[in-house]
Image (tube, grey):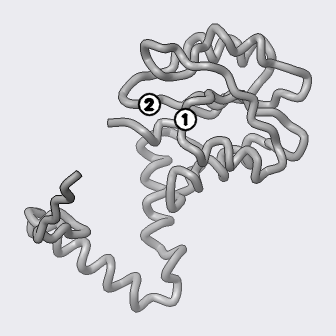
Amino acid sequence: MERIMSNKNVFFFPNKLPSSHEQFIRQAVFNSGINNKFILNDNVEQLEKRICQKTGAAAAIAVHSGTGAISVALRGLGVKQGDEVITQGFCCQPVASEIINLGAKPVFTDIDSDTMVMDANLIESRITKKTKAILPAHLFSNMVDMKHVNSIAKKYSLKVLEDACVQQ
């Protein structure tokens, strides 16, 4: 197989950025670089407040990645060692890894072969007395049947955490 190499540069930001955005980004990067609160700076706090205002949420936590979001959310749901979290077998690796990192056990359910996302009809057969939560992942612009997932969660008093990181 022939390997094709390109001399084209790939930039961190699009090269056709509106000038107002470019100025904002340059200033934000500069301010973060000279601030002694490089990671948890005022911009993050302002972003979290704006998210709460826009969504009506009581709190928001900005994180570095989808993996970080799953970790924080699972902890927020109270998932701990010995718990079980039902998730789909076909998914990105961090979903199961973050469950395991908390000492909990991922319990895999199959996907619907047409949509490639969790088959909500299979969830109830996976529930045990150790089940704490259901973690469906929406993939490739296909959504899990959340009405069905939420009705099962309500019936069994389980928490639901939706993962929508792999969308197109």
Q: Which of 61 and 136 is in front in this view?
A: 136
Q: Crowding near pointer 2: few (<14 within 10 Å), some, many (20+)? A: many
Residue type highlighted by circle 2: Leu
Residue at left 66%, top 29%? Answer: 87
Residue at left 77%, top 24%? Answer: 158
Instruction: Specify the quadrant of the image occupied by residue 120.
Output: top right
Residue 135 % position (x, y): 64, 31
Tag 1, which secondary structure? loop
If the image is split into quadrants, where does the C terminus sit?
Answer: top left
Residue at left 83%, top 27%? Answer: 131
Q: Are marks 2 and 1 in contact (CB under 8 Å)?
A: yes
Residue 138 % position (x, y): 48, 29
| Picture layout, residue 24 above or below residue 141 | below
Answer with mark 2 or mark 1, whichever residue precedes in sequence.
1
Please tell me whether mark 2 or mark 1 is closer to you in this view.
1
Mark linked to residue 32: none
Residue type highlighted by circle 1: Cys
> Circle 2 is placed at which residue position?
139
Label 2 and label 1: CA atoms lie apart by 8 Å
